[in-house]
Amino acid sequence: PGVRFLVVGGLNTLLGYVLFRTFLRGYQGLPHPVALAQGTSYAIGIALSFVANRRWTFRSDGAAHRQLPRFVAAHLAALGVSSTLMQAGVSRLGLPVTAAFVLVTGVTTAMNFAAQRYWVFARS
């Protein structure tokens, strides 16, 4: 499942980055535009990721109504970490947006794989 997870994640991340840059332009002038853009693009990615990871990555036949709340909880935790780290990386550390995005993506990828493999889609 590791390679499939990376494929799904890679495609999702590419789409997420395009959406992130688009929302970042749209949110200029608002407080914390980086965190807002990250949160919006991440939320869209959650929906796509659930379907792809459930069906293809982990090939789960478990009850979706039980998996979905766990999946959302894992992603909300990662979203909190992601948004906080993006804002801190850009505003406090002065990292370029792309560098911060790449670093944060590495952290959240590891978090999400572990959560999905051992909790969300774990075989009983």
Image (cartoon, rainbow, N blue to C red):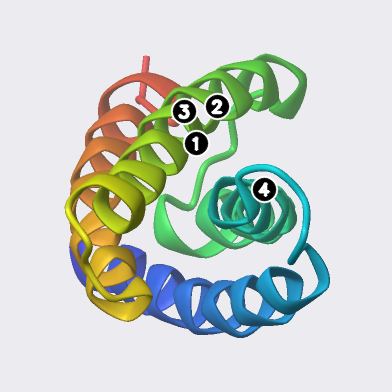
Please, what secondary structure does the residue beneath circle 2 have?
helix
Q: CA distance from mark 3 to mark 1?
A: 4 Å
What residue sits right under mark 4 in the picture? Answer: 36
- The disc placed on residue 76 is 2
Q: Amino acid at mark 1?
A: Leu
Q: Position of residue 87 (x, y in %)?
A: 40, 46
Can you see residue 108?
yes
Q: Position of residue 71 (x, y in %)?
A: 56, 29
What residue sits right under mark 3 in the picture? Answer: 80
Q: Nearer the viewer, mark 3 or mark 2?
A: 3
Outermost residue, front direction? Answer: 29
Q: Amino acid at mark 4?
A: Leu
What residue sits right under mark 1 in the picture? Answer: 79
Q: Amino acid at mark 3?
A: Gly
Q: Residue at x 77, y 20 (%)?
A: 65
Q: Residue at x 82, y 72 (%)?
A: 26
